[in-house]
Amino acid sequence: RKKKRGEGMVKILKTLANHSPLRKRKSKSKTTTIRLLQWNILADGLGEDGFLATEFSPIFESADAKSKSYSANEFMKLVREAKLADTASGMTNKFSKLKGEEKKLKKMKTSAEGYSELKESVAKLKEETNKSELVKLKNKFRNSPQLEKVDREILDWSKRFDRIKQIVLQADPDVITFQEIDHVQQFLVDKDFSAKYTCMVDSSKTYKPPNYTENKGNDDLSPDKYFQHILNSRAAFAPKSYSNAYLFRSKRDGKAPDIDDDGCAIFWKKEILKPVELGFLRVPSDTEKSEAVLALTLQHLETDMTFNVITTHLPSGDEPKKELERLAVLNNPSARWTARRICFDDTSWKELPYENNANFVGITSYVKYFAQRKDTQTIFALDANSRPSFPPIKPASSSSETNVWGTILRDTGLESIWVQSSCLKITGEPINPPKPFVVSVNKMRGPSSNQPSKIGEHQLELIDHVFTNGTKSKLFTSVALNNKELVPTAPLLYKSKEGEAELNLYPSSNMPSDHLPVVVDISLETHTHVSLLHFTQL
């Protein structure tokens, strides 16, 4: 059964490789190179959650002069053993159950039937999980000066912002796709960054973070106002309304004027590119929360070439049910999908319907729409939260097993830069078997995390992706700062999770996010620009 599982998907991917439209292109076609930087920068509102780093070692249990200390290797062994013990005893399952029941209890009215029983169950689970080895580890290192230094010297947003800005400016991309950005205004007003880049399609507009009130019906990003707000903002930014990032920042920073929800944004180099279309595909939701896929069409001022950039951030989680959740946003014909856009007609921005009343049934159909658009080429950059080797699973919308990697390749017709640059086979397998861990994230939460169940959970995988119908791509392995320091870029290769990988976790003083940036030059065929209004049937 295990051997057969996913064989159908592998056959489909190999067929795609043999019949790729890129193979049929003439090598003599004129191309323009676009440098892309794709990066989940770790939202400020989500950054202070006990991410683990061992660079400040030895690690002491407390500031007491007699406190016991541990080398980096010894400390990581403690974390690993506590995680294994909780997994073996079923404690990690109890943490998951507690989290779910706490959510239910929060939504219930005290007068509701079953409230008392649920409250009692939550209290019992809390008592049981307090006996966890991970909780004991958390209490043991509660006052560790070295772990406190990680929060102060590595996770502090002011330090991370300066570092992010420095890396981006030195990489000198033409286009930037960010996920988890919750400081749009800060990037736009920063003197150095804004001198080169913007995410505002209308330069006469000033970006303002959304306004939330005590009456949710009046909120800028309430469900019935979400679309109009993001279109009117004239920013290539798709926020996640009522996000945890906003909640945590507002609790910490009070009424600071620049508090944003985290979301996806596209910035571009102003001197060489001009926006001509901005669109959003809203992800179906049965809650108050809204989010959207972001699509931007840019015109290259020198060559007149137009190309499309699309970005999104898929749901997180390593369980099979989370992969099903991700597959459901890629393709779900039974859900109600809505898309709106604004286009530039040489004088002003106007909202126009998509051509021929395009019927989108998920993210991949939206991407495919752009990939098949005449006289343009497409780049799809995202944090997929799914590795290429994720075990195939059967979603409700399909008769066969698949995963996020296979679905994007099959449904969009695009190619992965990881395949084009010989990092992976089209099946998602690594090209270099001695180092099977091809990664864009290498992170772990430590004892100072407020989520004990996630302590010791080592995420070492490739979840940041770029797909394109560009003819070829060239990856950068690092970004040089001041001709002295090299900052690594994705992908990194490791032999195993233990040893080198767990001693070089991110974020760090060198890397300001839990994700590595992807820096790639993509060769796009040059086509003459045609007004987007010409394509539209009103």
Image: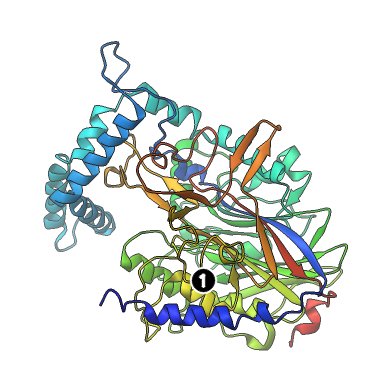
In the picture, which quadrant includes the C terminus? bottom right
Q: Residues within 10 Å of mark 1 (few under 14, many from 20)?
A: many
Q: Residue at x 68, y 66 (%)?
A: 472
Q: Residue 9 appears in which quarter of the rendering?
A: bottom left
Q: Is residue 496 above or below residue 417?
A: above
Find residue 314 and report its horizontal and vertical position in percent. 47, 63
Q: Residue at x 24, y 44 (%)?
A: 83
Find residue 384 and report its horizontal and vertical position in percent. 48, 62
The foreground one among 342 and 36 is: 36
The foreground one among 434 and 51 is: 434
Q: Is residue 190 above or below residue 69?
A: below
Mark 1 residue element: loop
**Residue 361 in view:** no
Find residue 156 and report its horizontal and vertical position in percent. 51, 33
Q: Residue at x 46, y 84 (%)?
A: 333
Q: Is residue 79 left or right of residue 181?
A: left
The foreground one among 111 and 530 is: 530
Query: Which residue occupies the extreme top position in the image?
Result: 65
Q: Is residue 195 left or right of residue 321?
A: right
Q: Is residue 228 above or below residue 368?
A: above
Find residue 360 and report its horizontal and vertical position in percent. 55, 81
Q: Is residue 211 above or below residue 291?
A: above
The foreground one among 169 and 94 is: 169
Q: Residue 144 appears in which quarter of the rendering?
A: top left
Q: Is residue 279 left or right of residue 90?
A: right
In the picture, which quadrant includes the N terminus? bottom left
**Residue 457 in view:** yes
Badge 1 amino acid: Ile
Q: Is residue 408 left or right of residue 497?
A: right
Q: Residue 403 appears in which quarter of the rendering?
A: bottom left
Q: Which residue is mark 1?
A: 426
